[in-house]
């Protein structure tokens, strides 16, 4: 199996900076590319802050933090990013046309045996690879936000993905300390985002119906299902709860569930107003740079504690 030494991450935003951090902390040589210089600087600051938190929590040493930072080279040159790359992770916006265009540019600049992995949230790999000159090297590695902490990476192949690429990708995900789950069949939204989208759709329905406010709905999730789901999944939950009870519950509530087939109106209104969440300072909740920084640090501290509890957990157990 080919050894991966040099990786490129395309897109230094919410996800790309975290993916770059993971590879760098695992000892890979990383080229982090973005079309905007200011995003690269923002990414550098976020990576430094996150690695400092890892040092504070004893996850890594101060020397390992410096080694990780030294493994990352920021660039606004796609050629420099991908020319010698063994493995490329694309993390640009969720617009398929943008992704097709960057894959076309990569085909002109990278080796044809370089793995190209997309961090897409929902787009089927067959659609992503539609115009690919080398479809056999294309795969999805779907990380979860924040990528540098959440263990899961969904791996999605298409019928032309080379078996060697699948095997290399799974091995690489384990080398960077992630928990890869390989889908046996591609489907829009894969596993986790289909589950999340069902929950998100119902959460907005409850909000729009005036059943509870956003903070209360978040609290109910965090103190209830979310508390459990960190350690037992939906099927384990049913076995613990009793399938007879769950049969009644599902028959009682299923007819009432929201069956909307598009993004909730509130999301559309917020996006139209440019209120995208922490990216822009306001979204469902109001944020300031100070509250965002504090909230991310608190979130990551709690995730690190959770990660300690989940150490050595593997997919399916
Ligand atoms: N935000 C999230 O919670 C998650 C997002 N994803 C997926 O990851 C991908 C990236 O999402 P985010 O990081 O949230 O987006 P983002 O908007 O935070 O970052 C995207 C970055 O890509 C850069 N960019 C745009 N066009 C580019 C191009 N042609 N070449 C290079 N860089 C370019 C932008 O300057 C920006 O820095 C999307 O496919 C998204 O669906 C996956 C898991 C979680
Ligand atoms: O929750 C996550 O981190 C991922 O499932 C995602 O892809 C994001 O939620 C977002 O892109 C919506 O799909």
Image: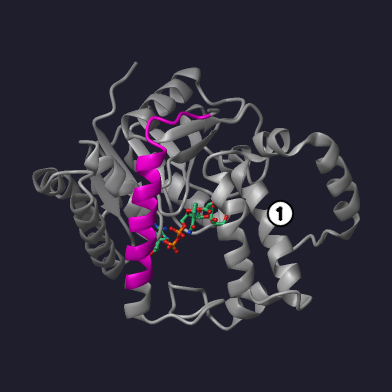
Residue 188 image position (x, y, % from top left): 67, 44
Residue 191: image x %, image y %? 63, 40
Q: Is residue 257 above or below residue 264?
A: above
Q: Return the x and y of residue 295 as percentages of the image width and height.
A: 38, 69
Q: Is residue 240 visible?
A: yes
Decide: few, some or many residues near mark 1? Use Cα within 10 Å; few <14, some 14-19, many ≥20.
Answer: some
Magenta stretch encompasses residue 300: yes
Is residue 10 in view?
A: no
- Dominant secondary structure (helix, strand or loop) of the stretch shown in magenta: helix
On the rendered structure, is 146 left or right of 243?
A: left
Relative to 48, residue 100 above or below: above
**Mark 1 element type:** helix
Q: Residue furthest left?
A: 63
Quadrant hosting residue 208: bottom right
Residue at the image position 30 percent from the left and 54 percent from the top: 33
Q: Quadrant of the N terminus?
A: top left
Q: Residue at x 8, y 45 (%)?
A: 63
Compare residues 268 and 199 and report the one nearer the observer. Answer: 199
The residue that appears at 17% across and 45% down in the rendered structure is: 68
Quarter of the rendered structure image containing ligand 1: bottom left
Region of the chain picked out in magenta, as a range? 294-315
Is 310 included in the stretch rendered in magenta?
Answer: yes
Residue labelled with disc 1: 198
Judge whether 131 appears above or below 287 on screen: above
Q: Nearer the viewer, residue 220 or 126?
A: 220
Between 252 and 180, which is closer to the camera in this rendering? Answer: 252
Q: Quadrant of residue 270?
A: bottom right
Q: Nearer the viewer, residue 221 or 202?
A: 221
């Amino acid at each position: 199996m080919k050894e991966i030494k040099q990786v490129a991450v395309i897109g230094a935003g919410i996800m790309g900076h975290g993916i770059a951090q993971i590879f760098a902390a695992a000892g890979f040589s990383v080229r982090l590319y973005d079309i905007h210089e200011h995003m690269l600087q923002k990414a550098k600051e976020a990576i430094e802050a996150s690695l400092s938190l890892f040092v504070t929590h004893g996850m890594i040493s101060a020397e390992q933090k410096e080694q990780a930072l030294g493994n990352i080279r920021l660039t606004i040159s796609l050629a420099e990013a991908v020319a010698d790359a063994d493995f490329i992770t694309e993390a640009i916006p969720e617009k398929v046309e943008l992704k097709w265009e960057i894959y076309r540019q990569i085909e002109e600049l990278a080796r044809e045996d370089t793995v190209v992995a997309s961090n897409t949230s929902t787009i089927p790999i067959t659609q992503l690879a539609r115009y690919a000159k080398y479809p056999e090297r294309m795969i999805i590695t779907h990380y979860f936000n924040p990528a540098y902490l959440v263990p899961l990476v969904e791996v999605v192949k298409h019928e032309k993905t080379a078996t060697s690429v699948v095997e290399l990708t799974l091995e690489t995900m384990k080398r960077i300390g992630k928990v890869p789950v390989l889908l046996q069949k591609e489907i829009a939204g894969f596993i986790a985002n289909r589950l999340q989208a069902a929950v998100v759709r119902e959460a907005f329905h409850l909000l729009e119906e005036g059943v509870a406010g956003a903070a209360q709905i978040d609290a109910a999730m965090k103190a209830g299902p979310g508390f459990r789901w960190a350690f037992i999944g939906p099927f384990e939950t049913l076995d613990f709860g009793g399938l007879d009870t769950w049969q009644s519950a599902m028959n009682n509530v299923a007819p009432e569930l929201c069956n909307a087939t598009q993004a909730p109106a509130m999301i559309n209104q917020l996006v139209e107003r440019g209120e995208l969440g922490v990216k822009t300072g306001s979204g469902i909740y109001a944020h300031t740079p100070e509250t965002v920084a504090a909230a991310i640090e608190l979130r990551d501290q709690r995730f690190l504690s959770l990660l300690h509890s989940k150490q050595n957990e593997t997919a399916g157990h």
